[in-house]
Amino acid sequence: MARGRIRARIRRSHLYTFTCLRPRSKEDGPHPMDGPGYSRIVHCNQPEMHKKKPFKYCSNYTSTTKYNVLTFLPKALYEQFHRVANLYFLGCAIISVTPLSPFSAVSMIAPLVFVVGLSMAKEGLEDWRRFMQDMKVNSRKVSVHEGDGVFGYRPWQKIQVGDVVKVEKDQFFPADLLLLSSGYEDGICYVETMNLDGETNLKVKRALEVTLPLGEDGAFKTFTGTIKCEDPNPSLYTFVGNFEYDRQLYPLDPSQILLRDSKLRNTTFVYGVVIFTGHDSKVMQNSTRSPSKRSRIERKMDYIIYILFSLLLVISLISSIGFAVKTKLQMPDWWYLAPNDTDNYYNPQKPAISGLSHLVTALILYGYLIPISLYVSIEVVKVLQASFINQDIHMYDEETGKPANARTSNLNEELGQVDTILSDKTGTLTCNQMDFLKCSIAGTAYGVRSSEVEIAAAKQMAMDFEDQDAEMSSVSRRKNRASEIELETVVTSTYEKDHKPTIKGFCFQDSRLMDGNWFNEPNSDVILLFFRILAVCHTAIPELNEETGTFTYEAESPDEGAFLVAAREFGFEFFKRTQSSVFIRERHPSSGQPIEREFKILNLLDFTSKRKRMSVIVRDEDGQILLLCKGADSIIFDRLSKNGRMYEEATTRHLNEYGESGLRTLALAYRKLEESEYAAWNNEFHKAKTSVGADRDEMLEQVSDIMERELTLVGATAVEDKLQKGVPQCIDKLAQAGLKIWVLTGDKMETAINIGFACSLLRQGMKQVCISAMNSEANEAVKENILNQITNASQMIQLEEDPHAAFALIIDGKSLTYALEDDIKQQFLELAVECASVICCRVSPKQKALVTRLVKQGTGKTTLAIGDGANDVGMIQEADIGVGISGVEGMQAVMASDFSLAQFRFLERLLVVHGHWCYKRIAQMICYFFYKNIAFGLTLFYFEAFTGFSGQSVYDDWYMLLFNVVLTSFPVISLGVFEQDVSSDVCLQFPTLYQQGPRNLFFDWYRIFGWMGNGLYSSLVIFFLNIMIFYDQAFRNGGQTADMGALGTAMFTCIIWALNCQIALTMSHFTWIQHLLIWGSIVTWYLFLFVYGMITPTISGNAYQLLVEALAPAPIYWLAILLVTVACNLPYMAHISFQRCFNPMDHHIIQEIKYCRKDVEDHRMWTRERSKARQKTNIGFTARVDAKIRQLRGRLQRKQPSVEHVNDITPSSS
Amino acid sequence: MEVDGASTSNGGASTSNGRANGGRSRRTAFDLFKQQQLPACKPVLTPVWVITAFMLIGSIFIPLGLVTLHASRSVVEIVYRYDAECVPKAFRGNKVSYIKNGSIPKNCYRSLKVHKHMKAPIYIYYQLDNYYQNHRRYIKSRSDQQLLHGHAHYDTSSCQPEEYNNGLPIVPCGLIAWSLFNDTFTFIRGRAELKVNRKNIAWESDRDHKFGKKVYPINFQNGTLIGGAKLDPDIPLHDQEDLIVWMRTSALPSFRKLYGRIEEDLEADDVVFVTLMNNYNTYSFGGKKKLVLSTTGWLGGKNDFLGAACIFVGSSSIILSIVFMLLHVKYRRNYRGTSYLSWNW
């Protein structure tokens, strides 16, 4: 991906291209360094000058932590109390020290401290990890000039602006440096910028000529110089500055700047002067803190909290008004309260004041409606869920040894609600590894191996036919069997591949060309030329692998690398490049000995996305001048000479075949040039090259165009853009789960379409809607044009009558800029949503983010962005969920992501299994949480009515304290962590189940209010039943009546029982852990009550020996528990029984099938249901197969009479 | 076997599983835990289960309710409201001034008829209505420390506003103790006085651990404002069981508290004469006062509610079960079938 960008940048960096021989331009002299933004002055090799102001710049110590020792407490506290609920609890805690509080201070403060402390500890731990990572970076050592030409090692953080540092091969640059000299004489060095932009190819940097003599340690004894340059800024690809050296001023540009966090490659060492340190460096300036994301459920939860807050407010108001009225009217008569001797809280003379202060009391008292522990429980649950995701062995990649990683745990449940996946292509769907697979030379196709697409398609189709067999009529089955057999041969033939040692980038197999056999082919001269073009026409750099003695190639693009590897394997090894020549070691079968040949590169006509071709003009050892060209077939075919079209027809046919099997194709051609012809052209070219001005590039292009004509076609190559393992299957499954998949790629349209076919996002018979912008038109006209295209396409889709018709939208980056404009974007989105698959090509990182935002905001559904490179960062941060592939490219995407996976195919499991589970778990958990707090909190309110609204709670403070923290939190956590409606296998086998998430079946308002209603019912039952049971009669031996302690404790016991039985009813999956936690909670309550009753009565008060002495011996207590528990749960039980029986959901039925072991008994039914359990989809293999079947059926119907006679053939059982 | 292994991610992982299996002889429980594959019981509410469960609940609760109801019904209870009757006719218009006037004798003689045989022990309760013993101000106004340690404990701030009197701390302090109930009852059957046992009416733990054995009332009911009963300053709080009972505050504004026990059986048609000292002021807030004589059963006092509720829950459960059964027969769903799957509609 981003190929165009790479190319473009390299042009800027003056490498090997049109401009590579351009004399250092004299016209753009020193930059005028004045004005704001250009104030930085660096005294080279004089770091002491930078010790004090005004030249004191920030140190090279970098920190990515959120807090430090001093700021941790205030900042982390601020973060915590940012949440409304926490703020409310803080207020409660503060009030609890005043007499207004209905509870003791400790019972208010302890849970808050626990909750906030836990969250803060988590924050602190995460920050500590970041700190340790920073420390590792900051203490990396680098060699620094310490004066007198002596270099010594120093940690990175001690480096100052002005220091001269020496960076060795494969080291990272510690800061932004000005390149002075390198191990190469001409002062170039190779840099890998993977950590910056995710690109794995090397970039060349070149030192100023004046500093080239500074090539050894000793030279820095006396070196001084001054750099005046721009202030720190985040732009990675620009730099403006002047270098003053020997009283001469030299302009600097980005090609002399080595950026921090990039790596020195292929170069023994470089010397450089530190310009920007630490947070001034470009990479640090670029880093943005990823936005904190919240899941849909959590946002909805806020609304529920608001509802509960209103409820809280309402009942508080009722209480305080009731209290004021009672205080005013009745309290003067209550002599036992000494109404004449009161403070303001209970002053009958001032009922308004009493009422107001009571409002505060009530707000605290009923605070149990707002679950304080909800946040912390959710946090705990999510961390545990995340650790399950991290531990999942099915998402562990053996090759790289990387597990899946939930980097932020607060989006787990969002994984279960994804509607649209926006995927990057290179590195995500594909490996970014090109394998030379087939070629067509002189009209003959070579290469016998099948592409992965062919294999995968064959496999899938064979399998699906098997499944379909049961349903199909015998006629069509026979038909299918035939193709099946065909497919099977393809599949089996590919297995041998695994046994051969593979060479990276080379999958070609054909004995006609290998091992020098090409020499015996009829067109061996053309084949020779073909190989030479592969070996010469490129911009790569060879690198000797010392272990194996072979060369590997640092190429700008992986396909170029694949060509070179192919050429090497064919016996044309490219091994050396100088500025003007390419050296090839040729092994001819005739001579046997390798011959080294030098090709003088006369000109190099660069690849651009517009030209879609590249050429070199070389002079071979015989003095013959040749133009070797490779490029897109359409472009090359347009430029063939009359005589050069010999193989056009055959090659075109082959190209089509290759294209269909998802291969990337290029055509190769050459042209022989006469010396004079070349000389004349070169003059023109030189003129164009040295011209100055805006139209220089255009002129160059025109001149190049003149030369790249009259070509002779040699052949074509087919390179496989290797799909990542399991990608087509994964896409198929995701599509069956009802997910929409958009591909956003920087690639050109053709490649993107190829990959679309390879992944089954596109298929034959799908109607492609291509939207592309015409160049060279006025903006308005282009926009008009695009709008027209969009409207036409929408109309076409609306008018389509075939129910099985599928559309694919393919749009390029240029059109996208217009389509994303405010006035069109809605229409564009509508069109895109109608299409089964959407592919956006040539999109910039910014556009990726914009498209993501459009989908996210336009459809209002959850989006997931998955990518691996730095160019995906925007998209990853913008989407509701960002997934980074921790593959070969840099860590940027992973760092910005919420989840990281080693392979795209793990996405299926992440979403369909973990997402599904987490969504249901969290949804059920939150519903239950509100249920339990309403059930508990309202009992407090009812009791108020019996106490003259005085704010007295019927429960002991300690009960209330333990309620949320200990007694009911563990079962709910076990629900949130361990609940499984169906096992992971079933989730994968029945992808439709996933749709329960995006449809939000488990957290809709119906369900939420249902649970709230259930809570209300429970609270009524618990309270009034208990009140009635323990009304006024004797409840125990000895004739004593129940006092407040006994009634409160009995009521509380009922609550504990009822709530825990309720959660047991809610669950459908019990391991010993759930049993332990649920029944353990009840046991804990009794244990607590027992222990609490044992400690001194000055603490336990009325609960002293309550259980042992009074309650446990009283049968009425146990009877009441039994009655209340059953009465609370009876309606819910009836509800779920009726729902399951008469309106069951899919997972209910699957549970039943599993429960009855029907899946084992009736395997046929199980398989049939499985194949049906998928969303109607128009993409993926399955859709492909379905379309094929439809096609076959259609054909059969037409041919019905003629195939009648084959009916009697009995099909073999499958 | 599974043809597809279903998942694409299984492709790579099954090999790793295989290896894990091969390397170690079996997967440890912890591995299963980490992979969320612990053996689990997955109950499914099949119709048989549902019907059985509801039936079971019904068949437990209905007999239980009947037994409970029977236990409650076998309790004999005499409730006699005396607050209005015990005010002399002259003061009926202004009961408050009557009760507040110390010079008027508060004696009151009443007779109760026993309807049914009452088996000893017969518990005597006084019942107050509309009395907010559960008011927050009231409940907080006590000092458990002082009750246990007496004068030695100085911090009585929680006892406001009955904390000090005449500059001296009150023992026992606080509103609860101060408003102690002070009506008294004596009973005569025929000629003989019925002996009322007023010992062991408080909770044993309260007596032994909450009220000090050496804590004597000091400065109690000594001020200008007299609340309820006075306490004998020579008897330690530990033995003042009336106080101990009173201090166990009731949960509801209508409550009974144990006064004593008659340890003789009362026969049906016995007439019991009660001598009341109608001292306690419930007239200012319109509270009722009742005298209750009650026997107890194994379940405690008389309260039909529990039994009725049990029967109600039991029968609704049976009804649910029957409804469910009927529905199930009528709209029979093949429990092992698949036609209800959403993709088969």
Image (cartoon, coloured by chain):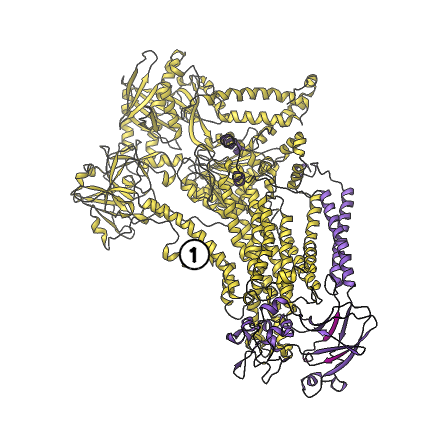
Of residue A1108 and residue A82, the one placed in the foreground of this image is A1108
Residue sitting at the far bottom = B103
Q: Quadrant of the N terminus of chain A?
A: top left
x%, y% of residue A899?
47, 42
Residue sitting at the far right = B269
Of residue A388 and residue A1176, the one placed in the foreground of this image is A388
User: Which amino acid type corresponds to the residue marked 1 in the rendered image?
Assistant: Ala
Q: Is residue A1163 magenta?
A: no
- The picture's colour for chain A is yellow
Chain represented in purple: B
- Pinpoint the chain carrying mark 1: A
Which of the 4 image quadrants contains residue A187? top left
x%, y% of residue A1069?
61, 43
How many numbered callouts?
Answer: 1
Q: Which residue is mark 1?
A: A76
Which of the 4 image quadrants contains residue A478? top right
Range covered by the magenta-colored residues: B274-296
Relative to B312, is A1191 on the left or the right?
A: left
Q: Considering the numbered disc 1 on the image, is that residue within a helix, a strand or a loop?
A: helix
x%, y% of residue B26?
53, 33
Q: Is residue A1 above or below residue B290?
A: above
Of residue A1100 and residue A820, the one placed in the foreground of this image is A1100
In this orientation, does residue A845 appear?
Answer: no
Label 1: few (<14), some (14–19) or many (≥20) C-alpha neighbours in 10 Å: many
Q: Is residue A966 above or below residue A286?
A: below
In this orientation, does residue A161 appear?
Answer: yes
